[in-house]
Amino acid sequence: MSSPMRRFLYWLGAGMAFLLFLFFLIPKPKDNPYMKIYSSLNGSGFSGCEFSNEKRPGVRYRFDVTPEECRFVIYQGGAGVRFYINYPNLKIVRVGGENEFSVFFYMERVSMGEFDADRHLAGKKPISVRDGIELYEFSGSEERKFAGKDGVPVYVSDYIETIRASRLYKSGLLVFYQYPKELTDIRAMDDFALDVLRKIVVE
């Protein structure tokens, strides 16, 4: 073998060894320590993921989604869990992913006996009511209230670039969701939010 060829193979081998060294130095992504992934094959009767913290025995969230989507859910052991949903395909997506429209969801459990969603409206009357949507004014800002398809009150506030809504879902789940202002139909967006909750949240 010629000397230039030996030199080439030597440097090629050295380069490959260096790349392998770097590969093992780079930390590998780890699953969320608060997450468990279940498969229907293991006899659990549930396929999806669960987020919980043994220090918070009353807090548990289950999602009927793929393991890949599970890994995009953000839960750090606290009271609430958050995630982003691609609109309109109902898929959980990565934070900062290249999605034209993503809807941010935050959920936490509340005590139904103590929680009053209308508390901030106590003593207030709507300044207008149109198509079943009540409009309230708060020191220059406005909030809209209407009944969702499930009969639950929905509260909607406008921000510079986004719209934020809140509602209760089923047995004591307080849900906030926020979406780009280009999506202007607040009733349609609440229908979308309900579709998301019904499809992926396991009670």
Image (cartoon, rainbow, N blue to C red):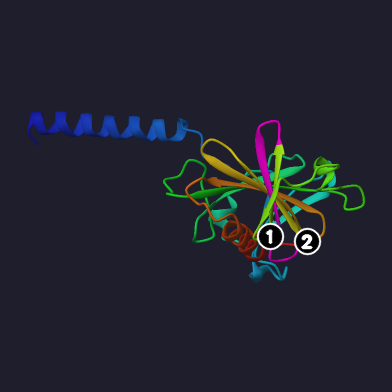
**Which of the numbered marks, if any, corresponds to residue 18?**
none
Label 2 element class? loop
The reply to whether residue 34 is visible in this rendering is no
Category of crowding for the residue at label 2, using alpha-carbon neighbours closer than 10 angstroms: few (below 14), some (14–19), many (at least 20): few
Considering the image in quadrants, where does the C terminus appear? bottom right
- Which residue in the protein does label 2 denote? 170
**Which of the numbered marks, if any, corresponds to residue 132?**
1
| Residue most extreme to the left | 2
Residue 146's spot in the image, x, y percent?
70, 56
What amino acid is found at the position of numbered circle 2 in the picture?
A: Lys
Question: Marks 2 and 1, Cα distance to the nearest angstrom?
Answer: 22 Å
What is the span of residues highlighted in magenta in the rendered image? 138-151
Q: Is residue 181 left or right of residue 157?
A: left
Residue 85's spot in the image, x, y percent?
55, 53
Label 1 element class? loop
Residue 87's spot in the image, x, y percent?
50, 56
